[in-house]
Amino acid sequence: MKLNMAEEEDYMSDSFINVQQDIRPGLPMLRQIREARRKEEKQQEANLKNRQKSLKEEEQERRDIGLKNALGCENKGFALLQKMGYKSGQALGKSGEGIVEPIPLNVKTGKSGLGREALLKRKAEEKLESYRRKIHMKNQADETAAEQFRLRFKHKHDEVKLEGDLRRSQRACQQLDTQKNIQFPREAWYWLGLEEETEEEEEEEKEPDKDEYKSEDLSVLEKLQILTGYLREEHLYCIWCGTAYEDKEDLSSNCPGPTSADHD
């Protein structure tokens, strides 16, 4: 008796007081959530087992089972085909060019009238085609706008380049004319900055003839062509090469041409 009591631990001893308990935060809540999920899954499984199938579902199951099974000799139509020489798996027709499988059965379950689905499909296709046309037209408009922007930008860039070439030609013309002791240019715009100064003087001195063109009537490209031609003929100088040649033969043999494109 004393031995048994010694083997039993005293409930007031440290072995009962110092028991380590799992007191991690949130652990009881996680256990409750897991238990609730298990109960919910079991309830769902029980509901699926005990749920009664609807009449439509039962009809669908019977129909699927019937369509999966091939016709047998007990079917009157199949028996008549066999009497006429038909064999299972053989195509219909005298030459065997007909169908092998029966025409599939499409059961209409909706309440809409005949042809309603085809009408809705056609309307949906028309709507999709209209949307595609709008997208195509929008893309074309965007491409046209982008192309016009590129052309405007290129035209502006070309204009800036031509104006720079014209100013360079005017400076070269003024320098070369001065070296030849030419005090006045052939045209006022041949020299840089001289055209604006001489415009008022020319208007006061004389009225321009009808046949005489004004510098305002010329475009930048036309002015550049005239001035570069003058530099080549009068000074044997090519603005694109940046070189004054000894004679016309030297100019024609060593200069690629009278335009900027010839020097590219």
Image (spheres, rainbow, N blue to C red):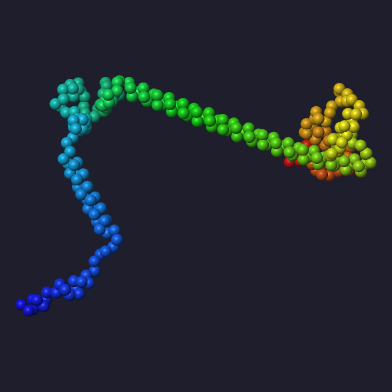
Q: Quadrant of residue 84?
A: top left
Q: Position of residue 34 (x, y in %)?
A: 24, 53
Residue that protrudes farthest toward the right in the picture:
181
Q: Nearer the viewer, residue 52 or 104?
A: 52
Can residue 175 be seen here? The reply is: yes
Residue that protrudes farthest toward the left in the picture:
1
Q: Nearer the viewer, residue 67 or 9?
A: 9
Q: Position of residue 263 (x, y in %)?
A: 76, 41
Can residue 248 be seen here? The reply is: no
Q: Does 149 sit left or right of 26 as displayed?
A: right
Quarter of the picture containing the C terminus is top right
Q: Position of residue 65 (x, y in %)?
A: 19, 33
Q: Residue shown at 69%/35% (left/top)?
A: 155
Q: Residue shown at 9%/76% (left/top)?
A: 5
Residue that protrudes farthest toward the bottom in the picture:
2
Q: Position of residue 209 (x, y in %)?
A: 88, 24
Q: Quadrant of residue 16?
A: bottom left
Please say if 239 is above or below 129.
below
Q: Residue shown at 5%/77% (left/top)?
A: 1
Q: Residue shown at 91%/42% (left/top)?
A: 178
Q: Does 246 sit left or right of 58 as displayed?
A: right
